[in-house]
Amino acid sequence: MLAIAGLGTPELVVIAIVIFLLFGATRLPQLAKALGQSKRAFKDGLDEGERDGRKDLEK
């Protein structure tokens, strides 16, 4: 069963419908792209911080 942050499938479907109604079909690809880029930048920042932390521990 799909559950993300305590939300079940019906709740996720309702959220997806609301997002679709708010942003429309034309802006959804742009929104998804921006979200993906933000996620990647956040992950890269975490990885960089972890590398810096390891370097500091090695000193």
Image: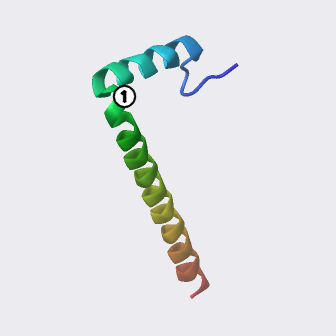
Residue flagged by tag 1: what amino acid is it? Answer: Ala
47 over 38 or under it: above or below: below
52 over 22 or under it: above or below: below
Question: Which type of secondary structure does the marked residue at label 1 adopt?
Answer: helix
x, y percent for residue 28: 38, 34
x, y percent for residue 42: 44, 57
The local crowd at label 1, few if under 14, some if 14 to 19, many if 20 or more residues have their Cα within 10 Å, is: few
Q: Quadrant of residue 51?
A: bottom right
Residue drawn at (50%, 16%), measured in percent from left and top?
13
Q: In which quarter of the image is residue 35?
A: top left
Q: In which quarter of the image is residue 25?
A: top left
Which residue is nearer to you in this view: 46 or 37?
37
Residue drawn at (48%, 56%), measured in percent from left and top?
40
Residue tagged 1 = 25
x, y percent for residue 44: 49, 64
Residue drawn at (45%, 64%), measured in percent from left and top?
45
Q: Quadrant of the C terminus?
A: bottom right
Side of 58 where 35 appears, left or right? left
Side of 42 where 8 appears, left or right? right
